[in-house]
């Protein structure tokens, strides 16, 4: 049984996916973290986000893997735990820019499909219901207005003691959506058989309950 949750940046996918995974006893797979680890690799090597030849050449050298420690997903890059380094806006924007590359996607999609083949997962990302797990039993397209999403991101960053400018965050979110929805390969879009959920005015519990309702409906 696999549950696919797609949607734009800051829609609450990871919070919801984690909660649903816990309720179901499934593994949560955060695919954005993989694109972020890849982006960190390029940033460290000084690769420009639009240098597709370098990205093609280097992406297969990036050693990205996923481990689970105490139920938490740990993303490693060359064996180093990079969980604490990939949540910045810089890495997020680089991940959005470099995830347009076909070789980057091929490598990470394979890793994601291997994980889902082994165990029941709740997987979130941009192309899970459309490309990575087209046969997922439950698919959700989770979104919220860009204003609400910017406010959520802002609060997250402030809570972590990081600096943040809400207008810049909203502008980045809109730019990121544009790129993720209009790229040539596996753009973000709602799968035909996905349920649309707008979380702008819903609590986390309400969204999780909606998804649990879809699971129950599937199970009959
Ligand atoms: O979900 P996130 O903000 O951590 O994702 C960062 C970027 O990675 C996102 O802007 C686009 C890319 N991404 C993708 O192309 N496909 C996925 N399945 C997940 C993320």
Image: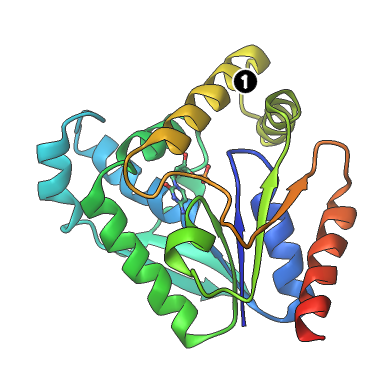
173 sits to left or right of 65: right
Residue closer to the observer: 191 or 176:
191
- Judging by the rendered image, the residue that carries numbered circle 1 is 170
Q: Residue at x 38, y 61 (%)?
A: 76
**Which quadrant, please, contains the C terminus?**
bottom right
With respect to residue 50, does 76 lie above or below? below
Residue 150, given in percent of the width and then of the height, sits at 68, 26
Q: Is residue 12 above or below residue 29?
A: above
Q: Is residue 188 visible?
A: yes
At a point 32% along the width and 40% down the height, the residue shown is 184
> Relative to 28, is 155 above or below?
above
Residue at 48 percent across and 28 percent down: it is: 178
Total number of numbered discs in the rendering: 1
The answer to whether residue 78 shows anywhere in this view is no
Q: Position of residue 95 (x, y in %)?
A: 39, 40
Q: Is residue 190 above or below residue 176?
A: below
Residue 194 is left or right of residue 90, and the answer is right
Q: Quadrant of residue 194?
A: bottom right
């Amino acid at each position: 049984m696999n549950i696919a949750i797609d949607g734009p940046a800051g829609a609450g996918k990871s919070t919801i996916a984690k909660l649903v995974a816990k309720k179901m006893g499934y593994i949560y797979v955060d695919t954005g973290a993989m694109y972020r680890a890849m982006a960190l690799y390029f940033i460290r090597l000084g690769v420009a986000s639009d240098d597709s030849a370098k990205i093609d050449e280097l992406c297969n050298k990036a050693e990205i893997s996923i481990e689970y420690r105490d139920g938490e997903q740990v993303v490693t890059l060359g064996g180093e735990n990079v969980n604490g380094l990939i949540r910045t806006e810089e890495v997020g924007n680089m991940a959005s820019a470099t995830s347009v590359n076909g070789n980057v996607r091929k490598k990470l999609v394979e890793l994601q499909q291997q994980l889902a083949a082994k165990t029941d997962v709740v997987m979130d990302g941009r192309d899970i219901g459309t490309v990575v797990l087209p046969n997922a039993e439950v698919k959700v397209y989770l979104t919220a207005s860009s204003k609400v999403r910017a406010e959520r991101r802002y609060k997250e960053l402030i809570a972590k003691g990081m600096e943040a400018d809400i207008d810049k965050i909203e502008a980045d979110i809109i730019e990121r959506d544009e790129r993720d929805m209009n790229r040539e390969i596996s753009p973000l879009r709602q799968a035909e058989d996905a349920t649309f959920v707008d979380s702008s005015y819903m609590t986390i519990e309400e969204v999780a309950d909606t998804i649990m309702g879809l699971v129950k409906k599937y199970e009959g």
